[in-house]
Amino acid sequence: MSRRTEEIPQNDHDPTGTAQGEPDGDRPDGLAKSAVATAEGPAAAADDPGSDRQRPARSWKAVRHLLVRLHFYAGVLVAPFLLVAALTGLAYTVTPQLDQLLYGDQLRVEKVGDEPRPLAEQIAAARAAYPEGTVASVVTPPDPEDTTRVVLAVPELGEKQRTVFVDPYTAEVRGELTTWFGSMPLTTWLDDLHRNLNLGETGRLYSEVAASWLGVTVLGGLVLWLGRSRGQRAKSARGALLPDRKARGVRRTRSWHAATGVWLALALLFLSATGLTWSNYAGERFGWLLDAANGNAPALDTALPGAEAPVEDHSDHAGHGGGEATADADPADFDAALTAARDAGLGGTVVVTPAADAASAWTVAQNDNVWPVHYDRVAVDASSGEITSRTYWADHPALSKLSKLGVQGHMGVLFGVVNQIVLALVALGLTAVIVWGYRMWWQRRPTRDDRRALVGRAPERGAWRRLPLPVLVLGIPAVIALGWALPVLGVTLAGFLVVDVVVGAVRRQRRTA
């Protein structure tokens, strides 16, 4: 066999990319023609019911070919959603620093004093400056140089609050901001941009599409890259973890795309899973799982002895200033509740929430989100200073802990600045992987004068027809179950299949004509 014959790829859609995939412009013209003819032959035979060619036998290789086509379509159609999520997430990672830059006058004190003033005095100063609404909660300063936050429930702000910042040492009002469960205005805007593109509930579909497909794309890419079989370099750890700098063209781009994806895989799977827990549809399924597994956080009994227990809000935002009171509580009771909580061992920053009614206790909850976290809560009878109920973070079920810690890690607060840096690097890495993916698509385009195209052809069609029966028997129910657990993934996957079937039917009709 001649050297030129050996160089002709057996299938231009070979998923490994180690013996094919270069654009036509990188080969002699005759070789390009042979490669195109070879690639079109099997695919055309599989799609054309009138072909005399025998349909290929079922093979485990078809699983890989199917993964290639799924990874390709996910990369082309879902990557824009992932790119937006990566860029908006990158912007969100620096919100703590941006808050300090923009709102430093409200968030920080000018001079740290010896002892803070009583909460009653600080609340009175805040109410004198901003009498509208009612006091929903008070957040003690996280650090000595931070201000106290008096959170007001104002009807015209809806689910948002007015937070008044008070110097704890002088009781001087430093200003006010419209906040959303403790988040400053810029953080709230960037959070909405990341979650829903500032389009409300409709926009949340974009982030759920991204989170649903991110895990599928990452796992599929890992299987394809780590499972490739050609070349000794491909079998080595170095070949899997480091890009091939000696390669050229699409092979070089592919090695950077895949190697970077391997390094980012665990972080991306973490972001996918945690992002889905508070998405619209998959998040609802996750809530059902928590209920079925008794994985919810233990409820704090806020009913005073002898009184009927009120309904409590178990959401993650409970106790962060979302409550509404009909009238201001006695400011002195804030000091009484705080003193009782401190005596009970609640240290660090806490959120003091007044009682909902005369039959209910006050709530004091730790709000330390940096590892090691502190989330103990106590119910306090402010009139007597007695602790009537308590929940410990240590007693939370494992699923509840994982969910809470996962959300904090996703938001970049669990490990402080280190968490922010890691998330920023992951966002930049994901952006690079997506750009390299589109570059590969462009590099694989036909460049001959009579076959020019803007982008490369899609991988081989019809792989599902050659799947082994065990894969079909086990795979179809698994895909259905996955589509139920992740409804947006199921709907979009069904849409991909419909589009693929329609495109195949149109091409067969054209060939027949």
Image: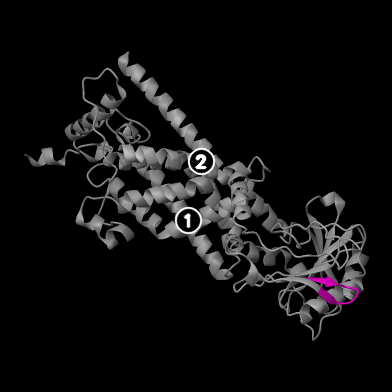
Q: Secondary structure at mark 2?
A: helix
Q: Residue furthest toward the top?
A: 513
In the image, the segment drawn in magenta is: 378-387
* For marks 2 and 1 on the same chain, the one whose residue lies earlier in the sequence: 1
Residue 98: horizontal and vertical position, in percent? Answer: 65, 63
Is-magenta flag for residue 381?
Answer: yes
Q: Comparing marks 2 and 1, which lies closer to the viewer? A: 2
Foreground pick, 198 / 224:
224
Residue 409, above or below 118: above
Residue 273: horizontal and vertical position, in percent? Answer: 53, 54
Residue under label 1: 268
Foreground pick, 409 / 356:
356
Residue 265, above or below 83: below
Q: Are marks 2 and 1 in contact (CB under 8 Å)?
A: no
Foreground pick, 414 / 325:
325
| Disc 2 to disc 1, C-alpha distance | 20 Å
Task: Give the residue type at disc 2.
Answer: Gly
Residue under label 2: 483
